[in-house]
């Protein structure tokens, strides 16, 4: 075995151990902040819950199946603890009535849906709102919450690295120029088009196209992308083979790797990827704003990580999440109310907006705001149809998934009477009202408003002023929820499982920190609140004491108030 082979083998064996060490250290950091129960069942449940919370945070930027699986396993252990201890008091939040009211509306709407089987089957997605209670009830400390947020941000960088690999490799063959005598000059292709497939096979170079020309018979069928639309054309294989030159020269094309596509990361769609990225970028922004050691290497690494995530978001060329992140940064700046933060926010927007405009124009061929653009025109049409459905079914809606039923579509002439692609209504408020009724929309608006209000209050609380972790978590959660709601105006992101699970995770972490802050306040108040018997005894003792003895006691109580804060 050569030296290079031995070195490779050593590195190959070392990588799993390195990953194991990193994960074990992170897991031990989480366990260090947890209370130590005496009961063996509680010990096992706590360790399972701690592990699944880490897995939930690590998998949330990547896989819906692993994310939901982690949440379900943790929820089972959590349910065992609740059944044993009946500790439901710590789960109460101001959003309880709105959350359970919304879910009740979904259940009633599904039972009376036009297509009950489809609607009832879809209730599983709405039931995952319980992940919010699982996270908010089992995050044991602010340190625990901070580590979970760091896990989300760091894990997202894997997805960003994958996206960078997509761009480096390219997708398809971009036509830069077509020579006058080329057989492709007679086709529908023009410079700027990207050839994606030839005879049903993916191509990434001129060599791939030339090989497919020689390997098959009949006309050459090409699938190509022009801006956001896909097209298909065909050429005579005989004309290509008989043209001047050989190999790739006979094609008469000047090409380059196709890189003006919208990145998707590890997801199947760029919109899902963009929605998740905006939430994680808001979390990273909260860490940056609150981090106290501005000249440390960790701070600059955090800025670099956030910058990479924002770059990936811009390269998705998805306008609503970019606008959502911009709104989130503005709201976070208002919550902080500091000149430096305001200046940094203005600078960030001055960089983000032009970059987003250029990215959208380059990959989609449209301006950032264009009422005549295809997706905008589609939304305007389906919104009109959805409003008509709400008017006819205002109380309980039509039921989840009903608009996809063939008979229902024909009866209500949906999607331009069959002329438009079948989908959903591309707006969370519109979709909620159409599927589950106006009462559900009211409950939905209530719990989103409560989420924003409570995170805003927490970011401005005394705890946030004393401990940067409180401020980091509250600001990040505030920004993420604001970004989600801004984007939801033109995207049905609440119906996207990956995005919804990330929302419940972030909101749960934020409300866990809120619970910890309230418990600290309640504990401090109870410690300074004397009992009735103690109060009477104290009064009798003070009456028996001479006047000179009362003054030193009063000075001793007042002394801690004059000490400076740490």
Image: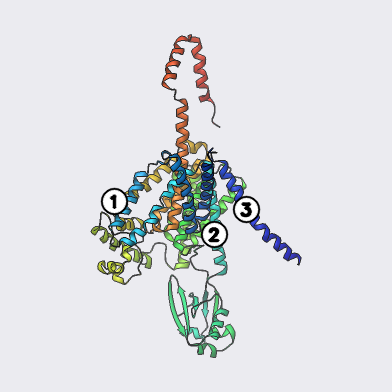
Q: Which residue is mark 3?
A: 20
* Above or below: residue 80 compared with residue 204: above
* Above or below: residue 510 compared with residue 322: above
Instruction: Report the front residue among 195 and 157.
Output: 157
Secondary-structure class at tag 3: helix
Secondary-structure class at tag 2: helix
| Residue 459 x %, y % | 46, 41
Q: Quadrant of the C terminus?
A: top right
Mark 3 surroundings within 10 Å by alpha-carbon count, few (fewer than 14), some (14 through 19), many (20 or more)? few
Residue 127 in view here: yes
> How far is the residue under mark 1 from the one under mark 3?
49 Å
Q: Which residue is mark 1?
A: 439
The part of the image, by quadrant, that contains residue 450 is top left
Q: Which residue is mark 2?
A: 160
Q: Earlier in the sequence, mark 1 or mark 2?
A: 2
Secondary-structure class at tag 1: helix
> How far is the residue under mark 1 from the one under mark 2?
39 Å
Q: Quadrant of the N terminus?
A: bottom right
Mark 1 surroundings within 10 Å by alpha-carbon count, few (fewer than 14), some (14 through 19), many (20 or more)? some
Q: Give the mark toward the camera: 3 or 2.
A: 3
> How far is the residue under mark 3 from the one under mark 2?
22 Å
Q: Are marks 3 and 2 in contact (CB under 8 Å)?
A: no
Q: Give the mark toward the camera: 1 or 3.
A: 3
* Above or below: residue 452 compared with residue 263: above
Left or right of 512 on screen, residue 384: left
């Amino acid at each position: 075995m050569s030296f290079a082979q031995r070195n490779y083998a050593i590195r190959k064996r070392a990588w799993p151990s390195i990953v194991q060490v990193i994960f074990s250290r992170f897991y031990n950091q989480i366990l260090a902040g947890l209370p130590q129960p005496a009961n063996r069942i509680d010990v096992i449940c706590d360790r399972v819950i701690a592990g699944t919370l880490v897995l939930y945070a690590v998998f949330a930027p990547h896989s819906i199946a692993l994310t939901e699986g982690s949440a379900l396993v943790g929820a089972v252990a959590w349910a065992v603890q609740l059944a044993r201890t009946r500790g439901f008091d710590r789960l109460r939040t101001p959003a309880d009535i709105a959350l359970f009211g919304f879910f009740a509306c979904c259940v009633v709407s599904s039972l009376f849906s036009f297509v009950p089987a489809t609607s009832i089957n879809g209730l599983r997605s709405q039931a995952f709102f319980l992940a919010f209670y699982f996270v908010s009830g089992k995050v044991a400390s602010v340190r625990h919450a901070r580590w979970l947020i760091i896990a989300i941000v760091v894990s997202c960088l894997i997805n960003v690295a994958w996206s960078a690999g997509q761009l480096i490799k390219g997708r398809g063959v971009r036509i830069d120029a077509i020579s006058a005598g080329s057989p492709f000059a007679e086709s529908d292709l023009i410079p700027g088009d990207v050839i994606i497939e030839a005879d049903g096979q993916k191509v990434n170079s001129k060599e791939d196209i030339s090989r497919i020309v020689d390997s098959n018979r009949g006309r050459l069928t090409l699938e190509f992308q022009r801006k956001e639309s896909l097209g298909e054309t065909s050429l005579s294989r005989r004309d290509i083979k008989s043209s001047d030159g050989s190999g790739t020269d006979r094609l008469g094309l000047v090409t380059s790797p196709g890189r003006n596509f919208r990145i998707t990361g590890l997801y199947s769609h760029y919109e899902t990827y963009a929605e998740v990225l905006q939430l994680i970028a808001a979390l990273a922004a909260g860490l940056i704003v609150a981090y106290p050691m501005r000249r440390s290497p960790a701070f600059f690494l955090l800025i670099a990580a956030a910058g990479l995530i924002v770059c990936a978001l811009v390269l998705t060329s998805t306008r609503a999440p970019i606008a959502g992140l911009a709104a989130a940064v503005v709201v976070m700046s208002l919550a902080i109310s500091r000149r430096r933060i305001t200046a940094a926010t203005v600078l960030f927007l001055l960089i983000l907006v032009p970059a987003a405009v250029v990215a959208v124009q380059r990959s989609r061929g449209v301006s950032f705001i264009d009422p005549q653009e295809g997706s905008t025109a589609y939304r305007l049409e389906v919104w009109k149809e959805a409003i008509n459905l709400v008017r006819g079914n205002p109380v309980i809606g039509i039921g989840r998934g009903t608009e996809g039923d063939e008979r229902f579509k024909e009866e209500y002439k949906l999607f331009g009477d069959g002329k438009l692609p079948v989908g959903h209504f591309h707006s969370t408020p519109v979709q909620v009202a159409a599927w589950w009724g106006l009462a559900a929309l009211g409950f939905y608006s209530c719990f989103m408003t409560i989420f924003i209000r409570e995170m805003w209050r927490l970011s401005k609380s005394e705890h946030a002023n004393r401990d940067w972790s409180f401020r980091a978590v509250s600001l990040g959660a505030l920004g993420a929820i604001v970004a989600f709601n801004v984007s939801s105006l033109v995207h049905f992101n609440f119906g996207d499982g990956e995005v919804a699970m990330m929302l419940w995770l972030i909101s749960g972490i934020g409300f866990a920190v809120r619970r910890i802050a309230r418990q600290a306040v309640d504990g401090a108040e109870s410690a300074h609140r004397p009992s009735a018997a103690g109060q009477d005894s104290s009064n009798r003792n003070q009456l028996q004491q001479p006047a000179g003895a009362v003054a030193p006691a009063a000075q001793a109580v007042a002394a801690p108030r004059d000490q400076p804060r740490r």
